[in-house]
Each structure stands twice: as structure tokens, then as C-alpha cells.
Image (cartoon, coloured by chain):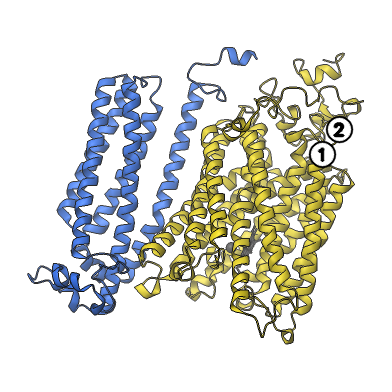
Chain colours: A blue, B yellow
């Protein structure tokens, strides 16, 4: 088995060369990202379809989303994209310490994003601005079906301060029901995105551990490169979600 | 004289390591292929059990139309749902790509493994989890939505078995995606430099086209099933009419995957056909490029015809007309393939081996299945045929008659490579013959019944409706088919116990690279790497050598141990 004796170091047995191995990984991760895009696609199609059919509902519903927190989250993720991109460069140049710092900043941003998101979700649950099927939702076809407790304390339901055009309880029933659909889509999209952020955090932590063990360098940075690509996609999806959900006018 | 080079005592991938973990935790594509193979066969028997249950309960007199009880109807709904879901998600979709593809693709490329062997193992484990969840579904019972999981059946009603079933299908989807991804990268990056795209065996083209569909379509069903899951457990409302949702939207998403999925099922079978027809006609395949390109064309077209499943679901008439026209166009690349196979046989010296018999059966079965698809693509006729047994017969002709027969033909074709045994005796041929006869007996009557208006998914029919004869013949046919398939399986299993008939490296005279490796192959596929790459269908590259009881390369490499043993004077 002479082929084995001079097999290049760090290259799996079934690859001929390091470049073949790296190129395969690259094509693999890009293909995977494509499947991710398609995975989200159905929800984007749902969004487009319902927004097209009920533009006023979407406009109205968007007011319940906290644009400031959404914008803040956008900035947080943009920063994390920047630091992870820098991290790839660090790995290529063998700058282990800088890579550690960049990975930590990226991780902190990701955690910050999730905390802000949790804050937003908490508010929604408190107000009952939820998908129609939830027991505490205020978007029921029949306003009398709204949980009395929510009906009493939810600002959105009663709208005492005139912040919005109308109180939810005075809306047309069909309109109110479709608001529930908007929030169904909102929670599915942001929830799925949040799961991807969590998975990203696991992957980033794994990179961090490996980096602390000194595994990355000019000859071995593929993992950093590929996970960074994944992270950019997660950011990119949010870049679409933010205007589509928060900035409807 | 038994071929000297081929003994099972030689170290090969089957006996190199031993023990449960050496299989369960393997990253060898060949072992994974075999594990898929036996897992799929097990599920096929399970699905087949439910098929027989369906056919027996439709036997005239078994369930009385006028006095049928709710339990009988529920049992029937459960049987056809489980049958469909198991056969589609656990059997046909993984059959050729995951089982045979895993075994053959790297070998055809002259490679040592797929690009990502660990991911490959992960795919298999995902498949196992999916299968176990299905078993859980069976235990919970009462899955009755049909394999299509349409809301509001799947979301409204309270049975928890929908949850496990949908979760299973979701996980199986990811298994399929990762397999496809692996093959795409493998075919792009692991081809030997001399093997250009147009020197690739057609099976690889077919697997490549399939992988593209797996990667692009499967995520969409993944998310749709996930939505069904949250819809059911948390009442999200996107599909549920009571909450203002749109159930037809689910149908669009579902068929956006599931139409391309029918090509995930049938394209690999077509790839096997191309190999069989060239090898057993001892002629270069006719129209190589048009077969290769038609696979790609089918993959592309398959994404834009899904609306033909929804002609009467309430999509706009304009949409229906467009989908109808596009659907017709799919028939063109399909027909190109059939004509090319037939032309390959023309003036060839055909050997009627078992794999070839399966291949030739498929010409008929796919012909009928494909042509009846055109009846369904026609708007006027589909209004009559939709949801009748005509549909049932159509898709069984394509899915069983073409995809599954292709799978079985492929198993026979590569069995010598997998286990070092040739299975080509009268018993195997009898299995094929009975399956062919039984299959037609089962499903031809369904075309007739369906065109007379016999609706699908009913637990019983009244005698006065006049479907009894068709149901009778169909059930009888199912028994013949069942017998045929068991005989085929028996013939395969028997080969393990027959001593002394060890397969040569190349029993059939195939020119693709896997035949340059001994049977069964060593752990890393080829004893000397890489093998010689030539035109995959140039039959003059191999010749029959009687001492070897098989074929050998005409210009053997001097360093090839297989050859050196047999013909030392020429080496
Ligand atoms: C040759 C081209 C084909 C054409 C033109 C065609 C056309 C159609 C049409 C129009 C329908 C919908 C009928 C209805 O529901 O009213 C249909 C159903 C179906 N076809 Fe095909 N088909 C073709 C090939 C295939 C192949 C190759 C497969 C599978 C390997 C397949 C599997 C199915 C299945 C599974 C269904 C019904 C699914 C269900 O309702 O449960 N078809 N076909
Ligand atoms: Cu279709």
C-alpha cells in the first residue's frame, strides 16, 4: 500500500490532497447553506402570500413590534458578522489570541441577540399579541373568546392611550383573526431563526474550545471558515426579517 | 475451475473487522450501503404487510359496504396511511440512492469513499431514528391522514400519532438531504481527472440529478412538516381554516416537494436501467448525451409541475392550464430515455440475465405508468380520474413498476460485488417473472376500475357499483406479486449458503470502474489505486475469460494482482 505511506498529513484517507479536501468542504457547506435558504423559503412564501392578500393587516400588525429592539438586534448581529469574518482572517494567519477574542465577541453578540429577542417575546406574551390559536392570544375571531384576564390588562386589546389606530377589541373580526396569522408567521420565522442562532452559538463555542487547544492555523482553518459562512447566513436571514416584519408602513 | 482470485477468505470489506460496532459505527460507504439495504428491505416487508392488509380487506365480501363499522373504516384508513408513508419515506426514497448509491457511487468513481464519510454515517443514524419514530407511530396507532398529511386532517384531530409520524418524516428528510449533499460533492470533487463529466457512467448522472432534487426540494417539505407539527401542537393557524389559515397553501408546499420527490424515486432507477441495457446488450449505450441531459432536464422540470396534483383543489384555471402544459413537457425527457434503452438493445447480443429481465420489465411498466401520467396531466380527463384508482394504478406503475423494479434489478446486478455471489439461477428468474405478472394483475384492473369511477381511499364498495371483479383480480394479483418478491428475496438469501460459486471480479462484463475491483472489494475499494478510466460503455475494453468465469480487461495493467494470478504469461 505505497499510496498510504506518503499520504499528506492532515488529509483524510479518502482524499488525494489537502486542496481536494478543502474544496470538498467548501462545496459541501455552500450546498448546505442553499438547503437552509430553502428551509426558510416556505415561511417567506407564507409571508408574501398573506401580506399580498391582507396588506392592511400586516401594516397594522407591524406596529406591535418594537422597532428599536429590532434595530438594536440588527446592529448586534452585524457586529458579530464582522468579528467572525475577522476571525477567519486570524485563523488563516495563525493569530490564535486574536481569534479567541473575536470568537468571544461573536459569542457575546449572539447571546445578546437572544436576550433581546427573549425580552421581545416576553412582552408579546404579556400583551397577548400572539398567534390566534394560543389560549392567551387577543387575536380571536370573536372578541368574547379572549381570555378575560388578558382582556382586562392587555394594553393592545383596550388601547387606552390611543397609541394605535384602533383597540383590538373594536376591530373587524376577520381582520383580528388575520392579525393572529401575522403573529403565527412572526413567531415561526423569528423562532426558527432563533434556533439557528442557538445552533450557531454551539458551533462557535466548539470553535473556541478547539482554538484554545491551538488547533487552528494557516494549514487548518477550514472549520472556522465554514462556520463563519453559516453565521453570515444566519445574519443575512435576520437582515431580511427585520424590515419585512418590523418596518411595514 | 473456480477462479483463483476470488475467495471469501481474502480480506475484504465484509470480514476486515468484526463485531456490532464495526458495522454500526462504520464510515465505510460499502457497509453503510449494506445496512441501508437491509433496513430498507425490512421496511419494505413491513409496508408490504400493510399492502396485503389493504388488498385483503378490499377483497369482495371481506367488508360489507352497507354494514361496515367505524372500526373497520378506521383500520382501513390506518392501513393505507401507514402503507403509503412507510413505502415512500422509508423504502423508495432511500432505496436506490442510499443503499445502492452508497455502495456504488464511490466505486464507480474509483474513489475510496464518499466526500464526507462521517456525514454519511450520520445520515444513516438519522434514518434509523426516523424509522424508530415510525415504529412508535405504529404502536400509538390510528394514523389516518394519508401519506400526504393534508391539514385539517393532520392538524385538527387529536391523535398523537400524527406528531411522531410527521417528526419521523422530517428527520428522514434530513437524512435524505445529507445523502444528496454528499453525492453532489463526491461527484464534483472525487472524480478521477481522466473522467470528465461526459465520461461518467449514466448511473452517476442519474444519482447527481437526484441529489440536486434531494437538496433543493427536501428542505421545503422539512419546513412544511415542521409547520404541521407546530400547527398541531400549538395551533399556529397558518394552515388551519378555523384560525383563518389556508389548507391549500400546505398542498402547494407539499407538492412542491413531493412531485420532485417522485423523481428522487425514479431517476436512480433509470440510471440503473442505463447500466443494465449497455452491459447486457454488449453495446455502447445509445444516445449517451441525451440520456445524461434528460436526467438533468427531468430534475429541472420536476420543480415546475407540482400544480398538476391540485387541478381540483381550487387553484386558478390559468394556473391549471400552465401546470398542465408544463407537465406534458416532462414526458419528453422520460420518453427519450425509453427510446434510447430500446435502441441500445437493437442488434445487441442480449443476455437474459436476472437483472436484465428486471430492466426489460421496466420498459413495459414505465411505459404504462408514464403514458397514463399524460391522461392525468390533461385537465378534462383528470377531473374524472382525480382521486380514483386510476391515480393509484398510475403511481404504482411508476413507483413500484419502475423505481422498485429498478432497485431489485440493481440489487441483482451488484450482488456479486456486494457479497461475492452471483444470483442468476432459475429461482431468481422465476421471482422476476412472477413479480411482473403479479404486478400487472394487481394494477391493470385498477386502471379499469378507476376509469369507471372507483374512488380511492374507501374501505368498501357495494356490489351493485360493479367494482367487485376488478377488486377480486387486484387482490389475487397482489398475492402473486407477494409470492414473486419473496422468491426473489429467497434466491438472494440462499446464495449465502451455497458454497463454491464465488463471483469473479466482473461477472457481467460491465465496463464501469467498480468491476475492476475484486468481488467483494477490499476495505479501500481497489487493491491498486486508481483503476484505469476508459469509456464507460466501450464493451471492447473487457473480454470473457473462461478460466475466470467472468470478464477481464483486454489490456490489463501489469501491476493488477487480479490479472497476474490468472494470466501470468500476459502480465
Ligand atoms: C411521465 C410523466 C408523468 C406524468 C405526466 C405524471 C402526471 C401525474 C399527474 C397529473 C398526477 C396527479 C393526478 C391527480 O391527483 O389527479 C400524478 C399523480 C401521481 N404521480 Fe405521476 N406523472 C408522471 C410520472 C410519475 C413518476 C415517475 C412517479 C413516481 C416515481 C409519479 C408518481 C405519482 C404519484 C405518487 C402521484 C399521486 C400522489 C397522490 O395523490 O397520493 N408520477 N401524476
Ligand atoms: Cu406529480
Q: Quadrant of the C terminus of chain A?
A: bottom left
Mark 1: C-beta under 8 Å from nearest atom of ligand 1:
no
Q: Same chain for the residues at labels 2 and 1, yes or no?
A: yes
Subunit ID for the residue under disc 1: B
Does residue B539 sit above or below A124 in this rendering? above
Rendered location of residue B512, percent (x, y): 72, 34
- The residue that label 1 is drawn on is B495
The mark that comes first in sequence, 2 or 1, is: 1
**Quarter location, residue B525:** top right
Numbered disc 1: secondary structure: loop
Q: Quadrant of the N terminus of chain A?
A: top right
What residue is drawn where x is 78% and y is 54%? B485
- The residue that label 2 is drawn on is B501
Rendered location of residue B342, percent (x, y): 79, 52
Gap in Å between the C-alphas at discs 2 and 1?
A: 9 Å
Rendered location of residue B555, percent (x, y): 80, 22
**Quarter location, residue B6:** top right
Q: Residues within 10 Å of mark 1 (few under 14, many from 20)?
A: some
- Badges 2 and 1: C-beta atoms under 8 Å apart? yes
> B133 or B540: which is nearer to us?
B133
What residue is drawn where x is 82% and y is 34%? B507
Indicate the quadrant of ligand 1 in the picture.
Answer: bottom right
Amino acid at each position: 500500500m505505497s499510496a498510504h505511506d506518503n499520504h499528506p498529513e492532515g488529509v483524510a484517507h479518502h482524499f488525494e490532497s489537502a486542496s481536494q479536501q478543502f474544496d470538498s468542504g467548501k462545496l459541501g457547506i455552500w450546498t448546505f447553506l442553499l438547503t437552509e435558504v430553502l428551509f426558510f423559503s416556505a415561511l417567506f412564501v407564507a409571508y408574501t402570500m398573506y401580506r399580498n392578500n391582507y396588506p392592511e393587516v400586516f401594516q397594522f400588525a407591524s406596529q406591535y413590534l418594537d422597532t428599536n429592539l429590532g434595530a438594536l438586534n440588527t446592529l448586534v448581529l452585524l457586529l458579530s458578522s464582522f468579528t467572525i469574518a475577522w476571525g477567519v482572517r486570524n485563523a488563516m494567519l495563525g493569530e490564535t489570541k486574536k481569534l479567541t477574542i473575536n470568537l468571544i465577541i461573536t459569542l457575546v453578540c449572539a447571546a445578546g441577540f437572544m436576550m433581546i429577542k427573549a425580552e421581545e417575546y416576553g412582552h408579546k406574551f404579556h400583551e397577548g399579541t400572539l398567534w390566534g390559536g394560543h389560549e392567551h392570544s387577543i387575536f380571536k375571531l370573536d372578541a368574547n373568546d379572549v381570555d378575560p384576564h388578558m382582556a382586562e390588562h392587555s394594553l393592545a386589546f383596550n388601547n387606552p392611550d390611543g397609541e394605535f389606530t384602533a383597540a383590538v377589541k373594536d376591530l373587524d373580526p376577520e381582520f383580528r383573526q388575520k392579525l393572529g396569522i401575522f403573529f403565527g408567521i412572526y413567531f415561526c420565522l423569528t423562532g426558527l431563526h432563533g434556533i439557528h442562532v442557538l445552533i450557531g452559538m454551539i458551533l462557535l463555542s466548539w470553535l473556541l474550545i478547539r482554538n484554545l487547544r491551538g488547533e487552528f492555523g494557516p494549514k487548518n482553518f477550514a472549520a472556522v471558515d465554514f462556520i463563519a459562512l453559516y453565521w453570515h447566513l444566519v445574519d443575512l436571514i435576520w437582515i431580511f426579517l427585520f424590515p419585512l416584519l418590523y418596518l411595514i408602513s | 475451475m473456480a477462479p483463483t482470485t476470488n475467495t471469501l477468505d481474502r480480506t475484504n470489506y465484509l470480514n476486515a473487522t468484526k463485531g456490532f460496532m464495526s458495522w454500526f459505527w462504520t464510515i465505510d460507504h460499502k457497509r453503510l450501503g449494506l445496512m441501508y439495504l437491509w433496513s430498507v428491505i425490512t421496511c419494505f416487508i413491513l409496508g408490504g404487510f400493510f399492502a396485503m392488509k389493504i388488498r385483503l380487506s378490499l377483497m369482495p365480501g371481506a367488508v360489507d359496504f352497507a354494514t361496515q363499522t367505524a372500526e373497520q373504516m378506521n383500520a382501513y384508513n390506518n392501513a393505507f396511511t401507514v402503507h403509503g408513508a412507510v413505502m415512500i419515506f422509508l423504502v423508495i426514497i432511500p432505496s436506490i440512492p442510499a443503499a445502492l448509491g452508497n455502495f456504488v457511487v464511490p466505486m464507480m468513481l474509483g474513489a475510496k469513499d464518499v466526500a464526507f464519510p462521517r456525514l454519511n454515517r450520520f445520515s444513516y443514524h438519522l434514518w434509523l431514528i426516523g424509522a424508530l419514530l415510525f415504529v412508535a407511530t405504529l404502536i400509538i396507532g390510528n394514523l389516518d391522514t394519508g401519506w400526504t398529511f393534508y391539514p385539517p386532517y393532520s392538524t385538527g384531530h387529536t391523535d398523537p400519532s400524527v406528531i411522531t409520524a410527521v417528526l419521523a418524516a422530517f428527520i428522514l428528510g434530513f437524512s435524505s438531504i445529507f445523502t444528496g449533499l454528499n453525492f453532489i460533492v463526491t461527484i464534483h470533487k472525487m472524480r478521477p481527472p481522466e473522467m470528465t463529466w461526459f465520461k461518467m457512467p449514466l448511473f452517476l448522472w442519474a444519482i447527481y440529478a437526484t441529489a440536486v432534487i434531494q437538496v433543493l426540494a427536501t428542505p421545503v417539505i422539512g419546513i412544511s412538516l415542521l409547520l404541521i407539527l407546530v400547527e398541531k401542537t400549538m395551533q399556529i393557524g397558518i394552515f388551519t381554516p378555523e384560525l383563518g389559515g389556508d389548507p391549500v397553501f400546505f398542498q402547494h408546499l407539499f407538492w412542491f416537494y413531493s412531485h420532485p420527490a417522485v423523481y428522487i424515486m425514479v431517476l436512480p432507477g433509470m440510471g440503473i436501467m442505463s447500466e443494465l441495457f449497455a452491459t447486457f446488450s454488449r453495446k455502447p449505450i445509445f444516445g449517451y448525451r441525451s440520456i445524461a441531459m434528460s436526467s438533468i432536464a427531468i430534475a429541472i422540470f420536476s420543480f415546475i409541475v407540482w400544480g398538476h396534483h391540485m387541478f381540483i383543489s381550487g387553484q386558478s384555471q390559468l394556473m391549471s392550464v400552465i401546470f398542465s402544459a408544463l407537465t406534458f413537457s416532462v414526458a419528453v425527457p422520460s420518453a427519450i430515455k425509453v427510446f434510447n434503452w430500446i435502441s441500445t438493445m437493437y442488434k445487441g447480443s442480449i443476455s437474459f440475465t436476472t437483472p436484465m429481465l428486471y430492466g426489460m420489465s421496466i420498459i413495459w411498466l414505465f411505459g404504462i405508468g408514464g403514458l397514463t401520467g399524460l391522461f392525468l396531466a390533461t385537465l378534462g380527463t383528470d377531473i374524472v380520474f382525480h382521486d380514483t384508482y386510476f391515480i393509484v394504478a398510475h403511481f404504482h406503475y411508476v413507483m413500484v413498476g419502475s423505481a422498485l423494479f429498478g432497485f431489485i434489478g440493481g440489487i441483482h446486478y451488484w450482488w456479486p460485488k456486494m457479497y461475492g455471489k452471483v444470483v442468476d439461477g432459475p429461482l431468481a428468474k422465476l421471482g422476476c417473472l412472477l413479480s411482473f405478472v403479479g404486478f400487472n394483475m394487481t394494477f391493470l384492473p385498477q386502471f379499469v376500475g378507476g376509469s369507471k369511477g372507483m374512488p380511492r381511499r374507501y374501505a368498501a364498495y357495494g356490489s351493485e357499483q360493479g367494482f367487485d371483479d376488478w377488486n377480486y383480480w387486484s387482490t389475487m394479483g397482489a398475492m402473486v406479486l407477494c409470492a414473486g418478491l419473496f422468491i426473489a428475496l429467497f434466491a438472494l438469501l440462499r446464495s449465502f449458503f451455497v458454497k463454491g460459486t464465488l463471483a469473479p471480479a466482473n461477472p457481467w462484463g460491465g465496463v464501469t470502474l467498480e468491476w475492476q475491483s475484486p468481488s467483494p472489494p477490499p476495505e479501500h475499494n481497489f487493491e491498486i489505486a486508481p483503476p484505469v478510466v476508459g469509456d464507460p460503455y466501450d464493451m471492447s475494453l473487457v473480454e470473457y475469460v473462461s478460466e475466470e468465469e467472468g470478464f477481464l480487461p483486454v489490456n490489463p495493467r501489469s501491476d493488477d494482482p487480479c490479472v497476474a494470478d490468472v494470466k501470468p504469461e500476459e502480465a
